[in-house]
Image: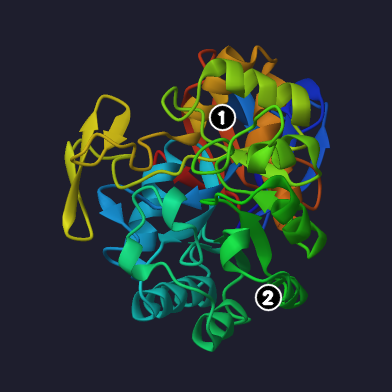
Amino acid sequence: MASQHYLARRLFDGWHWHENRTISVENGVIAGFSLVDDSAATVLEGTLVPGFIDVQVNGGGGVLFNQTPTLACLDTMVAAHARFGTTAMLPTLITDDIHKMAQAADAVAEALARQRPGIIGIHFEGPHLSLPKKGIHKAQHIRRLSGAEMALYCRTDLGVRVVTVAPENLHPDDIRALVAAGVKVCLGHSDADFDLVQQALAAGASGFTHLFNAMSQLGSRQPGMVGAALTGNGVCGIILDGHHLHPACARLAYLAKGAQGLMLVTDAMAAVGSSASEFAYFDDTLYRQGDRLTDKDGRLAGSALDMASAVRNAMAQMHIAQDQALAMASRTPAQFLGLADRGLLEPGKQADMVLLDDQGQVSASWIAGKQAWPQP
């Protein structure tokens, strides 16, 4: 790939703001910055920021990973989310049988082997969850850990591996084994009490899946999983679509955790990047009304949220500055996932970049220096 030079009128590197900074990209990697006005550089009007990293993406572009766990599905998801600034994602498989889990793993392994842009690993959301907090997860597939699942999670060809579990359905020794194998263990879809959550954290769990949603709530004498998440060191994913939680809860989360302890996630289903209003989910149908996605009984069923909207919503709901919202979309998830080459715009990092206009809408995005949206 030839060298590329961009003159960003405004640039956020993940920590600090800059103006009129020329950024050079070589072979998909940021080679350097300069204050020199390079006449050969492509001028970027707007704000250049690090690419967004989404830890929980179920689908996009009209496809759902559970329905079609294939390389083509992953390509469609990446393209759908790139237009909203996502340059790296963990395709997320909702609770399913072991055959579908293996298919999903094989698709991700193929994407990584073929160096498909945007795919960095896989997130298994279940099946070791709590029935009382299952949400739309299918009860017939919720189960305890067996050797088959453990072998799948321990595969070394899947990139970053995240597994969401309920502490009441997974022994601390199993959490230790997963962490020892390099798996990031998140807690969620759980009715566990505070003490049980503490045991899971002590065993190595390091994150929480969609804070406040599908977990034991904060009470005056029973802090629950929410209390453990707000007072502990685990990094919390949070869905800011205006439906999954009240803005006051979003502000509380920020006051408790800050940008370093929260990462914006979409929990996006097939709706993102699609104009359809109905989508298949196992043998059921999900319905979109505006930006709200529900099942036939009216329960929230994932979201129609994109990352650029999540950043704007974070600013509005949490009453925070743009740089803090951007950090939760890039720097924090990169640190949580151990991605040393992502999350910041600085020399040596992969050139995953997003150009925002004055309203926070995405004008363009690049993955490893190659423009992902709009496609050239």
Residue 90 % position (x, y)? 53, 57
Is residue 32 visible in the rendered image? The answer is yes
The residue located at (49%, 45%) in the rendering is: 371
Q: CA distance from mark 1 to mark 2?
A: 42 Å
Secondary structure type for disc 1: strand
Residue 182 % position (x, y)? 72, 72
Q: Which mark is residue 129?
A: none
Q: Nearer the viewer, residue 372 or 325?
A: 325
Q: Which residue is mark 2?
A: 174
Q: Nearer the viewer, residue 38 or 7?
A: 7
Quadrant housing the C terminus: top left
Secondary structure type for disc 2: helix
Q: Residues within 10 Å of mark 1 (few under 14, many from 20)?
A: many
Q: Nearer the viewer, residue 91 or 247?
A: 247
* Amino acid of disc 1: Leu
Closer mark to the observer between disc 1 and disc 2: 2
Q: Quadrant of residue 141?
A: bottom left
- Depicted 286 relative to depicted 311: above or below: below
Q: Earlier in the sequence, mark 1 or mark 2?
A: 2
Q: Residues within 10 Å of mark 2 (few under 14, many from 20)?
A: some
Q: Residue furthest front?
A: 221
Q: Which residue is mark 1?
A: 355
Q: Quadrant of residue 212?
A: top right
Is residue 46 visible in the rendered image? The answer is no
